[in-house]
Image (cartoon, rainbow, N blue to C red):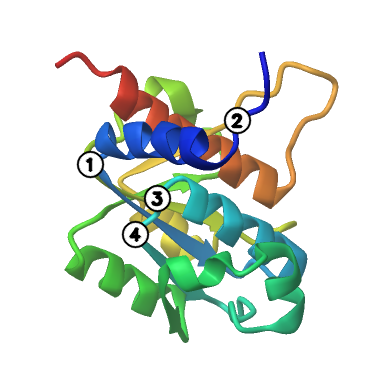
Amino acid sequence: MRPMHGTDLKRLHREWRRRTDHRLALLLDGVQQPYNVGAIIRTAAAFGVEHLYLAGGVPSPRNAKVQKTALGTERLLGWSHHESGAEALAAVREDGFTLVGVELTSTASPLAELDLGDATCLAVGHEERGLSGPLLTACAALAYVPTPGKVGSLNVATATSIALYEARRQEWSAPG
């Protein structure tokens, strides 16, 4: 057994890309910390996110601190900056995505119990305040990442990573 490199690694990634055809997007609503934004961008590129919608003062992917964590992966994603969540929501809908909020609310379902479909835009919010009110009410569904341990919530970049993986896992494990 040895770590994969070069051609073997490219072959492995190509195999997973062949199994991936659902459209997946991400809306960042007021995520303020550049290092969180950079980590989210890097994860989004790894999971084949089609587009990032940035709203509510999210730092640009061109920001030096964002780029420090994104490690150049920002060039692999389409992205657009919107003045408000409402403007971002209009763009999400125009592009044919269903908006699913990742948020701890009393009406949210465990993420693994939702059928995310084949054109989903996951929305994540500010590190402390979460999704803004208008976006929260505009979501077709709300989901959360269960945390059975002694910590009640996750860092926004970590929660986003888990949510993106779950969206792809559902696609990869669907019969057919």
According to the image, label 2 marks what residue?
A: 4
**Residue 54: x, y in percent?**
49, 73
**Residue 167: x, y in percent?**
40, 35
Q: Quadrant of the C terminus?
A: top left
Amino acid type of the residue tagged 1 in the rendering: Asp
**Residue 39: x, y in percent?**
67, 57
Amino acid type of the residue tagged 3 in the rendering: Gly
Sequence-wise, which precedes: disc 3 or disc 2? 2
- What crowding class fits label 1: few (fewer than 14 Cα within 10 Å), some (14-19), or many (20 or more)? few
According to the image, label 4 marks what residue?
A: 50
Sequence-wise, which precedes: disc 4 or disc 2? 2
Label 1: element kind? loop
Q: CA distance from mark 1 to mark 3?
A: 9 Å
**Residue 98: x, y in percent?**
26, 51
Q: CA distance from mark 1 to mark 2?
A: 25 Å
- What crowding class fits label 3: few (fewer than 14 Cα within 10 Å), some (14-19), or many (20 or more)? some
